[in-house]
Image: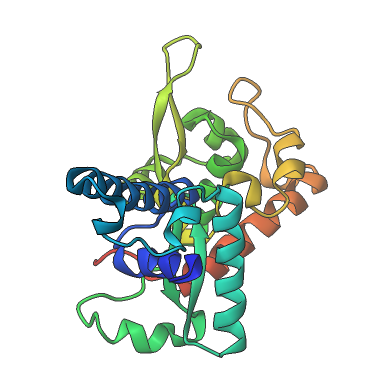
Amino acid sequence: MELISIVEALLFASQEPLGVPQMCAAVKETAKDILDAASESAAAAETAGEGPQVPEWVAPLAETTEEQVRAILDELIARYESEKHSFTLVERANGWRIAARGEYAEWCRALYPGKKVQRLSQPALETLAIVAYRQPITKAGVEAVRGVSVDAMMQQLIDRGLIKIEGRADLPGRPLLYGTTEAFLDHFGVRSLDDMPNASELRRVKLPTAEEGAPAAGDQPQEQQLSLAPVTNGAETAAEETAADES
């Protein structure tokens, strides 16, 4: 039995994403349990030769490293690609999982006739983009950038599980701070906030603050408008390809 087969079996058997440390620990602990059980049986029989025979491949598995597991994952992805399987491995914020390829989404969606695709509106995408790139941020901070009230948009995003309350700001009135959730990362197919398009650049762009007030749309700096455009476009594309919760 090879490590690649064991890792594949773990991913297949789990209903939740698995992290590399989880898979590594499962392999090592199981191998050690097998070796310990064989050792105890041999000791009880007083003769090592009368104990159960342990395959030679078990002992090396007790020393499995995370680097080996990562290499196995890359090998599996390459194998699925070369053999033209309809599924592959994808990494999300909370681990790896087996998933159908995007081109089979319509066929897989037929298994869930009670659900339909729900897309975020442009205002909701813009609000979500601001929260995602500038979190933690207050509602007033989002409104300063958008120039309009975002009460309905923020509540919609919370209800969809895409943003959450992170705490309170150290400002007069202690306003709530908002940030994105793991569901946001999974929904848009990114492993972390650093994987979002132009993450480092957009975090440095100077935006109007709640204290300064939001300029009128025509008065906004051209650099700001251009910087925010890729966020909403990229998010809109991802939203169109992802099925949301049942309406």
Q: How is the image coloured?
A: rainbow
User: Measured from the top left, where is residue 19 in percent x and y?
Assistant: 45, 51
Quadrant that contains the C terminus: bottom left
Residue sitting at x 30%, y 45%? 36
61 on left or right of 209: left
User: Measured from the top left, where is residue 53 in percent x and y?
Assistant: 32, 62
User: Measured from the top left, where is residue 45 in percent x and y?
Assistant: 18, 49
Residue sitting at x 30%, y 76%? 116
Q: Nearer the viewer, residue 138 or 167?
A: 167
216 on left or right of 19: right
153 on left or right of 130: left
Q: Nearer the viewer, residue 14 or 47?
A: 47
Q: Nearer the viewer, residue 154 or 32?
A: 32
Q: Can residue 105 be seen?
A: yes
Residue sitting at x 45%, y 54%? 59
Q: Can residue 153 be seen?
A: no
Question: Is residue 49 depicted above or below 145 in this figure?
Answer: below
User: Measured from the top left, where is residue 1 in percent x and y?
Assistant: 43, 71
Q: Nearer the viewer, residue 100 or 129?
A: 100
